Image (cartoon, grey):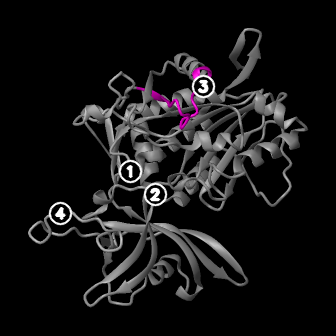
């Protein structure tokens, strides 16, 4: 299976943040990683490989070096994507419809006239316990229809009126009943859920030699996949602690217990330091953080929307380092220089990106995480088109570039030398 096929398979399987974490868990387990519980005492061993999951949608994985730990090599991406969250079903004279709420900032019009399914997690009562179970209805269940131009000249996107999906089935047939059938339980045993609409369209490659990939959820699962493969494929590091962080909730501000604006990363780092008998502040001072989230590629039809002074990025042009003077991205001169050196060592092309000066642009995980775990940090990404559309486009070569440089990153440690800073390889 080549990289393009593997990425497509990952995208197709990761229909929600919960499914993305399940995919990552399955891969880590096959690689010999041990699951940890936050509610239990940790006994970490030199050379050990571990991961933990919080609230089903975020995952942290790390390795303990065989030598004395000098710091953390951290990389993060996010598992969630813009969508519509399911609330309940209701009926009208002719249809059964879904009550949904906008999650993040999807481009509304791209979700219309497109077959949709539903996935996420169901909370199932079993005895006195409540179990969280990942679920995917798989088949198309509904659609959000537009109005013909004959009847309504202006395209309407009122969230409470125009973006309401209708589903098949007799009036009164609840989504919970379909969930129960899928899970093999009674609908009365489903006591809660976190479910999201997703396009059933599969990822596909196009262009000469499959140069481009079109898929839902490229933002940010392409980075999730690249970081994960780089993390697993890295050479042994006898000094630094490689740590992979896959956060949920980025699209809604990260302020959840499993988001970047929580104690998930900093708390885990503190527990690792304590288990090693090391000073957490000292380890933090020798750490580096890579925040990976896709970037806006140069649009073929609207080049004027990019920075005309040359800080643009193109699909298949290499890993993108993102800058912002207001520090919406964490990159500064030092972190840019250090990451550029890594890319050069890994023989990976580098692109620089900044928003057009009159456009504020977005922010991502780096600055949010830095408030909790303050370390040297750079914001990177991969160029893509149609960000926040139901279906996005990116370059297939860029996934391989990211995997390659991250494998290099996770096998290095940051060292303070007399003249400044350097990457060291200690295996």
Q: Is residue 39 magenta?
A: no
Q: Position of residue 92 (x, y in %)?
A: 30, 88
- Give the residue number, with chain letter if any, for mark 3: 408
Viewer-nearest of labels 4 and 2?
4
Query: Which residue, as the protein is rendered here, is positioned at the far right?
Result: 277
Q: Position of residue 292 (x, y in %)?
A: 53, 38
Res 353 → quadrant: top left
Using the image, determine if residue 36 lies above or below residue 5: below
C-beta proximity under 8 Å, tags 1 and 2: yes
Q: Of helix, strand and loop, which one carries label 1?
A: loop
Q: Earlier in the sequence, mark 1 or mark 2?
A: 2
Viewer-nearest of labels 3 and 4?
4
Q: Residue at x 83, y 37 (%)?
A: 280
Viewer-nearest of labels 3 and 1?
1
Using the image, determine if residue 146 lies above or below residue 400: below
Q: Position of residue 339 (x, y in %)?
A: 58, 23
Drawn side of residue 122 relative to residue 131, left or right: left
Drawn side of residue 342 relative to residue 310, left or right: right
**Badge 4: residue crowd in 10 Å (few <14, some 14–19, many ≥20):** few
- Give the residue number, with chain letter if any, for mark 2: 104
Q: Of helix, strand and loop, which one carries label 2?
A: loop
């Amino acid at each position: 299976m080549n990289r393009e096929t593997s990425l497509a398979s990952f995208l197709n399987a990761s229909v929600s943040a919960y499914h993305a974490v399940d995919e990552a868990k399955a891969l880590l387990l096959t690689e010999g990683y041990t699951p940890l519980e936050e509610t239990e005492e940790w006994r970490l061993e030199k050379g050990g490989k571990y991961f933990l999951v919080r609230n089903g949608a975020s995952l942290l994985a790390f390795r303990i070096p065989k030598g004395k730990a000098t710091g953390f090599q951290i990389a993060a991406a996010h598992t969630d994507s813009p969508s519509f969250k399911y609330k309940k079903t209701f009926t009208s004279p002719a249809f059964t419809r879904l009550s949904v709420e906008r999650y993040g900032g999807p481009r509304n019009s791209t979700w219309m006239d497109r077959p949709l399914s539903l996935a996420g997690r169901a909370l199932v009562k079993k005895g006195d316990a409540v179990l969280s179970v990942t679920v995917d209805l798989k088949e198309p269940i509904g659609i959000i229809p537009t109005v013909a131009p004959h009847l309504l000249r202006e395209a309407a996107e009122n969230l409470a009126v125009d973006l309401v999906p209708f589903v098949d089935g007799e009036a009164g047939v609840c989504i919970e009943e379909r969930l129960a059938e899928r899970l093999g339980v009674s609908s009365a045993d489903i006591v809660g859920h976190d479910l999201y609409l997703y396009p059933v369209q599969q990822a596909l490659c196009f262009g000469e030699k499959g140069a481009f990939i079109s898929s839902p959820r490229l933002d940010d699962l392409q980075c999730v996949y690249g970081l994960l493969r780089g993390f697993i494929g890295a050479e042994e590091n006898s000094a630094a602690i490689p740590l992979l962080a896959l956060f949920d909730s980025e699209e809604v501000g990260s302020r959840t217990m499993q988001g970047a604006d929580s104690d998930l990363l900093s708390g885990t780092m503190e527990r690792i330091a304590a288990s090693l008998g090391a000073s957490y502040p000292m380890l933090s001072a020798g750490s580096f953080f890579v925040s990976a989230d896709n970037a806006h590629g140069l649009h073929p039809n609207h080049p004027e929307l990019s920075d005309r002074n040359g800080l643009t990025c193109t699909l298949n042009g290499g890993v993108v380092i993102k800058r912002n003077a207001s520090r919406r991205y964490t990159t500064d001169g030092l972190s840019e220089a250090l990451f550029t050196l890594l890319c050069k060592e890994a023989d990976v092309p580098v692109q620089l990106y900044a928003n057009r000066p009159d456009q504020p642009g977005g922010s991502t995980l780096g600055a949010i995480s830095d408030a909790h775990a303050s370390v040297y940090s750079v914001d990177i990404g991969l160029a893509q088109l149609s960000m926040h559309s139901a279906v996005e486009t990116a370059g297939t070569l860029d996934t391989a570039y990211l995997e390659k440089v991250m494998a290099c990153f996770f096998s290095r440690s940051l060292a303070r030398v007399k003249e400044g800073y350097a990457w060291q390889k200690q295996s």
